[in-house]
Amino acid sequence: MKLNYMAAVVCAAFVLTSCVSSKKFKKAQADYVQLQTRYQTLEGSLADCNNQKATLHEEKNELNKKIADLNREIELIKQNYTATLQQLENLSVISKQQAESIKQSLQNIGAKDAYIQTLQQQMAYKDSLNLALVMNLKGAIGNIEDEDINIKVDKGVVYIDISDKLLFKSGSYTITDRAKEVLGKVALVLKNQPEIEFMVEGHTDNVPFKGNAILVDNWDLSVKRATTVVRLLQKEYGLDPAKMAAAGRSEYKPIAANETKEGKANNRRTRIVILPQLDQFFKLLEPATGN
């Protein structure tokens, strides 16, 4: 009798232990799947950042070429200046006109040196501004799927493409609740940098819009969607209206072929074009006059 009782106790303990181990194993499996998903998301974000870094690197190389050309020009001025001094070595008196010419040459050299230094500073500012802005935007809206929202930098301008399925219902310019969530996160980043100006562009596919009492065609629909977003950013999130513009592109700036359902979906989007204040930088790229 005692032996049977002991055997029953041992069996019960073994069964309980197996149940507990099975629960732990399933939990560990679930944790692993969650970590794997998170890893893949972070890996995708890293790839985007690397692409943006490569674009900025190309722009930086172009500006470095500009600096190299300016350095060669300075070297030529210095050589001409040295040659002028050598020609004047045997003269006992330097004329007023010659003295003024030498003075002007020295001023030109100083201006070119200052020009290069300012250009280099603007390059560094431009790179850091774009990278910081993109990283802030990605951090703010990092929970949005890639196919619904895309952020990129091209030639110093930051573009945010938001799929219309997040913002509007088909053929409508009334913003959805989900759109307010996305635009609120974008607005938070833009509000922290009040000097930045931006434009909101509406885009459609090539399916003709069936007009109504208010809208006639895709032109009207794209413009109305852009002004709806701008109005929301101003009234609900407090962005400065003087820093915003609204535009409609209709169907004429596609990013994919309209022959497929997926292509049409990609073309139906709202684009926020962020224009950093780089007026001084671009003025530096203009040809110098009077030197």
Image (cartoon, rainbow, N blue to C red):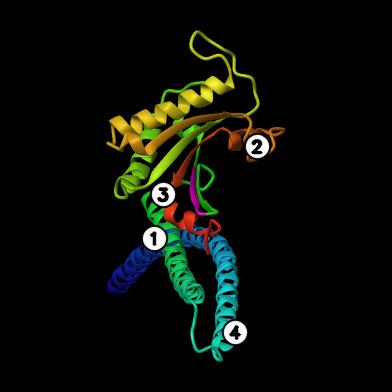
Residue appearing at x 39%, y 31% in the figure: 230
Q: Earlier in the sequence, mark 1 or mark 3?
A: 1
Q: Which residue is mark 2?
A: 263
Q: Which residues are magenta?
A: 156-160
Residue mark closest to the camera, 1 vs 4: 4
The percent coordinates of residue 174 (x first, y second) are 42, 23
Q: CA distance from mark 4 to mark 2?
A: 65 Å
Asked whether disc 4 touches disc 2, contact meaning CB atoms under 8 Å apart, the reply is no
Q: Which residue is mark 3?
A: 143
Q: Quadrant of residue 211?
A: top right
Q: Earlier in the sequence, mark 3 or mark 4?
A: 4
Say whether residue 13 is left or right of residue 107: left
Say whether residue 138 is left or right of residue 192: right
Q: Is residue 154 magenta?
A: no
- Between residues 15 and 70, which one lies in front from this camera angle? 70
User: Which amino acid type is shown beneath numbered disc 2?
Assistant: Gly
